[in-house]
Amino acid sequence: MRATLTAGRSVTVTSGDTTLFRYDFGAPRPHATELRTRAGVAVRGTIAWSPPHAEPGAATHRALTELSATTSTATIGHRLRWPAVDEWRSLTAVLTGDDTWLLLFENTVTNVSGRALPLAGPSLSLRVVAAPSAARSEWQAARLAGGTVVVVDDSANLAHPPRWSAGLSPAPFDTGTRTLRSDQTIAFRYAVIIAPASHDARRAPRLAALGRDALAGIPVAVRGGLCHGEHTRHGPVRRTRTPVLTRQCTGGALSS
């Protein structure tokens, strides 16, 4: 796999001659776009995340903390600042089969506004994807003309399992039930599986199981900048999940 940087703007992740997605980290709302299956078929949808509070505003990209690729994975990590929160974010693309790949999204979010922020509504969203709202569940799927998309919520996320608003968007927080205190850090983690279009009703649960396994721990390569609580040894590791992460990436910032 390859992760190709366009300085100050985006990273394009490819597998062989196929572009899997482009991540626009310099956008006011950083997002993954131009999604494709491993066969190169375009899949409608844009994967974005914004803080789940009223009027989150626009993000400002601070620095890339990781840009790496192996034969089967590619990882993008960066720091960004929203008007009310600081965020560290990582996206890891993983080839999971001959026709399937997975995007692992994880971040930590710290309230730097000096006041409590009421949490409400969705955070991760797949815009354009036509999927109905749903009651609380671990995962949700959409069958599209170009492919099948499944989103799995990590069991360690707050208010797991979430409700699902239209567009495969997990919406864990009921209005007024939770707040993010000043200087408090919380974490979110999701798996998004991209597979060819299928009318097999058994396919989506199998893909969801794939996402669940990935969230339980994906082997990751040694990185230039370590996060507290990650690894300090060489070789593949599995990340430990807790309901709230307080780690902040230090060192290893890349020019962007």
Image (cartoon, rainbow, N blue to C red):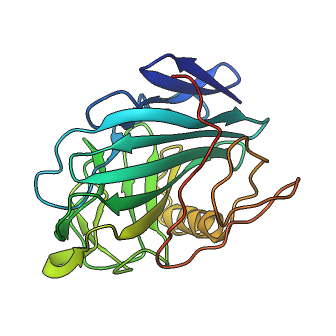
Is 254 displayed left or right of 180 in the figure?
Answer: right
Q: Which residue is at a point 37% across and 79% down the rendered structure image?
A: 161
Q: Which quadrant does the N terminus fall into?
A: top right
In the displayed orientation, state which residue is furthest to the top: 6
Instruction: Give the residue furthest to the right.
Output: 234
Determine the residue positioned at 64% across, 71% down. Answer: 216
147 is higher (above) or lower (below) than 8: below
Q: Quadrant of residue 128?
A: top left
Position of 9 compared to 13: left or right?
left
Residue at horizontal 56 percent and vertical 20 percent from the top: 5
Q: Position of residue 255 (x, y in %)?
A: 56, 23
Residue 173 in the image: above or below residue 235:
below
- In the rendering, at what x and y percent does residue 123 appear? 28, 58
Measuring from the top left, give residue 163's x and y in whole percent: 26, 74
In this view, 130 is above or below 54: above
Q: Nearer the viewer, residue 131 or 69?
A: 69
Q: Is residue 242 left or right of residue 25?
A: right
Front residue of this view, candidates 118 and 236: 118
* Identity of the residue drawn at 26% across and 56% down: 51
- Work out whether residue 37 can be spotted: no
